[in-house]
């Protein structure tokens, strides 16, 4: 169906490129247009001000000046709000990129670190709710495909050696195991648990 989101082209909000081993982040210009106040408003205001130096302005001219000032103030507020939003988005994505640097450099999902909203909120100084809004709705274009930001967030699990690993790493390993299983004899949860255990992951069968 054409209504299926998976069939629709996603315009990424961010773009990460690898420039000679260094990751470079940018906002997609399609989603971050350059905004400025129309010079026509400024010119009109200057014209009325010049007239006011020569003669006393009429009531209609005074109302026109007030109207133009209100429009300029509203435009300034809007531009500032958009720039603040863009700054918030960039700061959030930049922090995620630094946190998951190895993944964005290699595309290897096993390098993804455990990362929760609180981690990014603490580093950026932004509210968790703000990070959540960005993570749940924004996309980043990488050399390895366009990803939704929420894909990079996961809780942590401990290995038998006490090392923390991302649940995403475990899911990827489990996915690969299931892909290779004999479909006529699917592996039981207990068997999957044993395979994970042999790999070093501490995980309960009910979690599997």
Image (tube, rainbow, N blue to C red):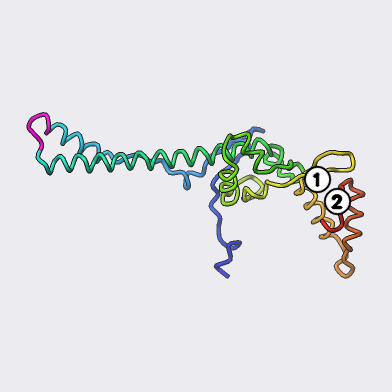
Residue at (67% x, 38% y) in the render: 119
Q: Give yes or no for contact between labels 1 and 2 (Cβ–Cβ under 8 Å).
A: yes
Magenta stretch: includes residue 55:
yes
Q: In the rendering, at what x and y percent does residue 37 appear?
A: 32, 40
Q: Residues within 10 Å of mark 1 (few under 14, many from 20)?
A: some
In the rendered image, the vertical position of residue 124 relative to residue 203, given as above or below: above
The answer to whether residue 208 shows anywhere in this view is: no
Q: Is mark 2 on a helix, strand or loop?
A: loop
Of 160 and 175, nearer the camera is 160
Residue at (61% x, 38% y) in the render: 121
Q: Is residue 208 left or right of residue 1?
A: right
As drawn, the label of residue 86 is none
In the rendered image, the vertical position of residue 46 relative to residue 143, given as above or below: above
Magenta stretch: includes residue 120:
no
In this figure, which residue is indicated by the disc labeled 2? 203
In the rendered image, the vertical position of residue 73 relative to residue 144, given as above or below: above
Q: In the rendering, at what x and y percent does residue 169 appear?
A: 78, 47
The answer to whether residue 75 shows anywhere in this view is: yes
In the rendered image, which quarter contains the C terminus? bottom right
Residue 5 occupies quadrant: bottom right
Of 179 and 95, nearer the camera is 95
Q: How far apart are marks 1 and 2 (CA)?
A: 8 Å
Residue at (67% x, 33% y) in the render: 21
Residue at (39% x, 40% y) in the render: 79
Q: In the rendering, at what x and y percent does residue 118 appear?
A: 65, 40
Q: What element carries label 1?
A: strand
Residue 62 occupies quadrant: top left
**What residue span does the magenta drawing correspond to?**
51-57
In the rendered image, which quarter contains the N terminus? bottom right
Q: Is residue 201 left or right of residue 36?
A: right
Q: Is residue 75 left or right of residue 150?
A: left
As drawn, the label of residue 157 is 1
């Amino acid at each position: 169906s054409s209504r299926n989101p998976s069939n629709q082209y996603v315009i990424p909000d961010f773009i990460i490129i690898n420039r000679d081993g260094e990751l470079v982040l940018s906002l997609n210009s399609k989603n971050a247009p350059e905004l400025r106040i129309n010079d026509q408003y400024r010119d009109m205001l200057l014209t009325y001000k010049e007239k006011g130096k020569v003669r006393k302005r009429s009531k209609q001219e005074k109302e026109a000046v007030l109207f133009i000032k209100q429009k300029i103030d509203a435009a300034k507020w809007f531009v500032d709000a958009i720039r603040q939003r863009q700054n918030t988005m960039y700061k959030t994505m930049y922090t995620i990129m630094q946190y998951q640097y190895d993944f964005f450099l290699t595309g290897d999902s096993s390098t993804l670190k455990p990362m929760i909203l609180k981690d990014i909120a603490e580093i950026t100084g932004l509210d968790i709710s703000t990070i959540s809004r960005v993570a749940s709705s924004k996309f980043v274009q990488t050399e390895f495909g366009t990803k939704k930001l929420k894909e990079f967030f996961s809780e942590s699990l401990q290995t038998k050696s006490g090392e923390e690993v991302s649940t995403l790493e475990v899911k990827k390993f489990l996915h690969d195991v299931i892909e290779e299983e004999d479909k006529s004899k699917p592996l039981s949860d207990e068997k999957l648990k044993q395979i994970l255990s042999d790999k070093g992951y501490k995980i309960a069968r009910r979690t599997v």
